[in-house]
Amino acid sequence: MRSKNTDNNLNPKVVVNFAIKNEKNTIENSVSMAKKSYYKPEVLVVDAYSSDKTTELAITTGAVVIRQSKHLFPGKGLAMKEGLKEAIEE
């Protein structure tokens, strides 16, 4: 069975979720490359309490940044889960 061509099928919502901590050397390039995608994704960065300029660089590059809810390290699983929850709620 084929799906109907609705606006949602023609323009799917795509979110790229980065779980990060202290990635000031790579975050700008990562966000920029993700934003160049054909699908024009929203880029979501879940920060695990970085102590460098990672969050500021992510914001200036066009990402939406949220802070991980718990100060856990390593906390990649938690960050990915929270990013997914944020993407679904928008």
Image: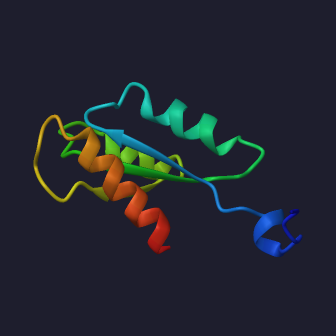
Residue 21 visible: yes
Considering the image in quadrants, where does the N terminus appear?
A: bottom right
Residue located 18% across and 46% down the image = 49
Residue located 65% across and 62% down the image = 13
Residue 47 visible: no
84 relative to 23 in the view: left or right: right
User: Residue 68: x and y, percent?
Assistant: 23, 54
User: Residue 47: x and y, percent?
Assistant: 28, 47
Query: In the rendered image, which quarter is residue 5 located in?
Result: bottom right
Determine whether 43 is above or below 8 in the image. Answer: above
- Total marks placed: 0
User: Residue 69: x and y, percent?
Assistant: 18, 59
Residue located 75% across and 71% down the image = 8
Q: Residue furthest front?
A: 1
Picture colour scheme: rainbow
16 relative to 8 in the view: left or right: left
**Nearer the observer, 60 or 23:** 23
Residue located 48% across and 68% down the image = 88
**Nearer the observer, 14 or 32:** 14
35 relative to 1 in the view: left or right: left
Determine whether 23 is above or below 11 in the image. Answer: above
Query: In the rendered image, which quarter is residue 89 located in?
Result: bottom left
User: Residue 28: x and y, percent?
Assistant: 49, 35
Determine whether 20 is above or below 39 in the image. Answer: above
